[in-house]
Image: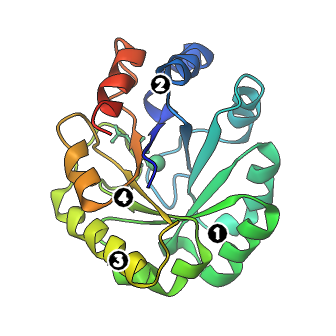
């Protein structure tokens, strides 16, 4: 599977967001990870529609939108219209996962299904045929800069095995949380191929940080 870096702008300097995004584009990142939080599903509030509309105007990079919000089905069309290319929703937030996942697909976005560290991987197995990507969270969602939870790595392995068993070899496995040069190999070796990194990228020399992570690909 192709390996892709998805820098998370949650850790960027919002006073210079356009320049920070350009730095990761210049480094060769293919996705931009955009964390939308509502203060209910997660304790924090990040940013929402106006920010996405603004940055959509300044870059063609793939927008990988991670919805950490309750009842995400309310906003899927809105985020697609704002320019989201991949829309990930949390299994913990869905009343009718099949319906919501099919709705994302019907809108023409790539379908992502995310799960929290304490959610067992088998909970997403019934929906694997409906998704383009599964996002395994390796920190508690809500805050950047936390430490990678190693206990989540076996979930990536089990997911990879299940996808292979079912012949779903085109489904991406995204890993989100605590990825840095010290933890990325563990996630890659387990089977992840879309790599989110926030705090490890958006500090000091952003382009160099992104390149240092991609050197592990
Ligand atoms: C956390 C977010 C992550 C976060 C990752 O809720 O979903 O995308 O930005 O940040 P780092 O890479 O610093 O753990
Ligand atoms: Zn995220």
Label whose residue precedes the other's in the sequence (2 or 3): 2
Q: Between residue 55 and residue 160, name the one nearer to us.
A: 160
Q: Which mark is residue 121?
A: 3
How far is mark 3 from mark 1, CA to CA? 21 Å
User: Residue 88, how many percent across, how many down?
Assistant: 57, 59
Q: Secondary structure at mark 2?
A: loop
How far is mark 4 from mark 3, CA to CA? 11 Å
Which image quadrant for residue 166? bottom left
Camera-side mark, 1 or 4: 4
Q: Quadrant of the N terminus?
A: bottom left
Q: Quadrant of the C terminus?
A: top left
Label whose residue precedes the other's in the sequence (3 or 1): 1
Label whose residue precedes the other's in the sequence (1 or 4): 1
Camera-side mark, 2 or 1: 2
Residue that label 1 marks: 71
Q: Are marks 4 and 3 in contact (CB under 8 Å)?
A: no
Label whose residue precedes the other's in the sequence (4 or 3): 3
Label whose residue precedes the other's in the sequence (2 or 4): 2
Residue that label 2 marks: 12
How far is mark 2 from mark 1, CA to CA? 27 Å
Quick one: label 4, few (<14), some, or many (20+) residues within 10 Å?
many
The residue located at (64%, 40%) in the rendering is 62
């Amino acid at each position: 599977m192709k390996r892709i870096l998805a820098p998370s702008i949650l850790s960027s300097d919002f006073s210079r967001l356009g320049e920070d995004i350009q730095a990761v584009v210049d480094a060769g990142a293919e996705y931009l990870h955009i964390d939308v939080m509502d203060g209910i599903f997660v304790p924090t509030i990040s940013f929402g529609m106006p920010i996405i509309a603004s940055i959509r105007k300044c870059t063609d990079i793939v927008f990988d939108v991670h919805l950490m919000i309750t009842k995400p089905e309310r906003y899927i069309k809105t985020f697609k219209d704002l320019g989201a290319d991949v829309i990930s929703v949390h299994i913990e937030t869905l009343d009718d996962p099949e319906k919501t996942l099919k709705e994302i697909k019907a809108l023409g976005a790539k379908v992502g299904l995310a799960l929290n560290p304490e959610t067992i991987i088998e909970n997403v197995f019934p929906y694997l045929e409906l998704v383009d990507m599964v996002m395994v969270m390796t920190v508690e969602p809500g805050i950047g800069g936390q430490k990678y939870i190693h206990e989540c790595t076996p979930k990536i392995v089990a997911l990879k095995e299940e996808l292979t068993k079912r012949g779903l070899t085109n489904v991406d496995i995204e890993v989100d949380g605590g990825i840095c040069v010290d933890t990325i190999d563990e996630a890659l070796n387990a089977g992840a191929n879309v790599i989110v990194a926030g705090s490890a990228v958006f500090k000091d020399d952003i382009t160099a940080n992104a390149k240092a992570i991609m050197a592990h690909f």
